[in-house]
Image (cartoon, rainbow, N blue to C red):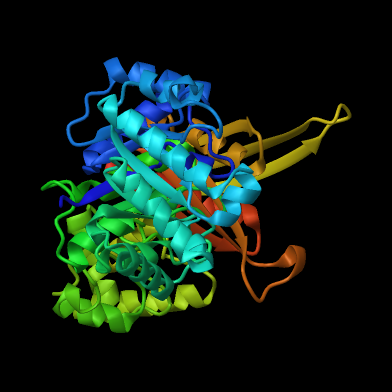
Amino acid sequence: MTFQVYDTTLRDGAQREGLTYSVVDKLAVARLLDDLGVGFIEGGWPGAVPKDTEFFRRARTELELRHAILVAFGATRKAGLAVEDDPQVRGLLDAQTPAVALVAKADLRHVERALRTTAEENLAMIRDTVSYLVAQGRRVFVDGEHCYDGFRFDPGYTSAVAETALAAGAERFVLCDTNGGMLPSQVTAVIEGLVARTGIAPERLGMHAQNDTACAVANTIAAVEAGVRHVQGTANGYGERPGNADIFAIVANLQLKLGMPVLPEGCLEQMVRVSHAIAEIANIAPDTHQAYVGAAAFAHKAGLHASAIKVDPLLYNHVEPTVVGNDMRILVTEMAGRASIELKSRELGLDLAGHPDTLSRVTGRVKELEADGWSFEAADASFELLVRSELSGAAPVRPFALESYRVIVEHREDGAVVSEATVKIRVRGERVIATAEGNGPVNALDEALRVGLARHYPELREFELADYKVRILEGSHGTGAVTRVLVETAGVGRDWTTVGVHPNVVEASWHALVDALTYGLDRARVPGGTAA
């Protein structure tokens, strides 16, 4: 039986706190999931949620899916109501999707206390709704809500729910760990118990895991190893409470660890791009430490790791990063050894292999600066400038020479707070004085520096201060503490980050700003120079 990868980002994933998709967002996410190569995309609950109804209407003309089948989600008919008279069931048909997913109670306690109906009526609701939709030409999946808890409480009744759904024509019966409380061994035990009790082939079962025990992906893999051939998940593990099983980790583990080709050829390498694009649409910062797709998933910090990676990257990488669209990175910190520095420099296009003395100097300088509070782990641009200065034997060629700067902050009577900065610099033999205001002292300083340099370096118009972070370093206290500043700049088709450290936050910011402009102008291939 064909393995099925079923994504529910647009329905279950959208239940994450603080996440709201517009119809346009949902269409964009659906296209990205199709690029990933999932087999099914659950689009929402038509009839119950107006936005989802609109999504399915627009999807009919605006979505051209290459890999996936669109699925409408709903519930079985209401107790005591004929299926053809249930408006919610009619909404599923009106969505005009090839497939439908039905949620059904699989725990007798929920049937009696939540639905407030009888065990027999619940089975009839499942049987009637599934057979009716199948007769209307729909492929039907049944999600057994609270299936694991239900089986552990009353295995006979939960088994009857699964048998009823499949006998009525459901393509797969999905065992849902709705409250996310299971562990892998418990998942295996329930699946084996259900199969033994009913004789249902395990490949006709599916797995839907919530992440309340942080075991959602592991539980899903355990289900597959028990014979299940339908898995559900969401992009980046989005979902209510701690979330759902991460679809990216699921398919990567199945394909790379178990050798199961669950995605079309060439799709696995789209994972990083799709993950980050969906995060952008959701307005959620990508998780840098997310397995497989995170920026730190293949980042190595310790010098011991780097020494081994220099010989063979797979000695410390559990898979080749490029197979999921990621890259290996070497982090430069006080833990770095010569191998780390050499590999990181090579990553930046600077080969220190033939310069052992320079390599030793850079390694020593990094350790010295990091001991004083500098951090090059997230500041590749500052690290590259340091390496270039050691290679050339001279300080980085700055686009200007500083004479002085001054920053004032004025709190006016009307409550307005205004920052003003003045810089005095020498640029290509000319003394320049420039003043500018900003919404804070660092912004004012940045603006004044740009004003002073603009005539000589018009390329600066392309640069934008994208992010600014300040951290009080551990071990220092009060307003006199040492601060570290990271400045992220965007321009010339890329982003770069620089670092500055000083007891004075403005001076720390100045160091980071000067590095940012120096690096950016170098990348824009503008010849630097000072008039010192």
Instruction: Confirm whether residue 531 shows in the render.
Output: no
Of the pair 369 and 217, the residue shown nearer to us? 217
Residue at the left extreme, as displayed: 265
Judged left or right of residue 78, residue 9 is: left
- Where residue 530 sits: x, y (%)? 38, 47
Task: Look at 48% across and 20% down and name the residue there.
Answer: 85
Of the pair 499 and 35, the residue shown nearer to us? 35
Identify the image quadrant of residue 491. Answer: top left
Task: Look at 36% across and 17% down and name the residue there.
Answer: 58
Determine whether 193 is above or below 347 in the image: below
- Where residue 65 sits: x, y (%)? 22, 29
Determine whether 404 is above or below 296 in the image: above
Of the pair 420 and 143, the residue shown nearer to us? 143
- Where residue 146 sits: x, y (%)? 50, 55
Identify the image quadrant of residue 197. Answer: bottom left
Determine whether 290 is above or below 265 in the image: below
- Where residue 179 sits: x, y (%)? 54, 57
Identify the image quadrant of residue 336. Answer: bottom left
Disc count in the image?
0
Judged left or right of residue 198, residue 262 is: left
Residue at the front extreme, as displayed: 120
Determine whether 70 is above or below 40 in the image: above
Task: Look at 73% across and 71% down and name the residue there.
Answer: 477
Task: Look at 51% across and 38% down and name the residue there.
Answer: 449
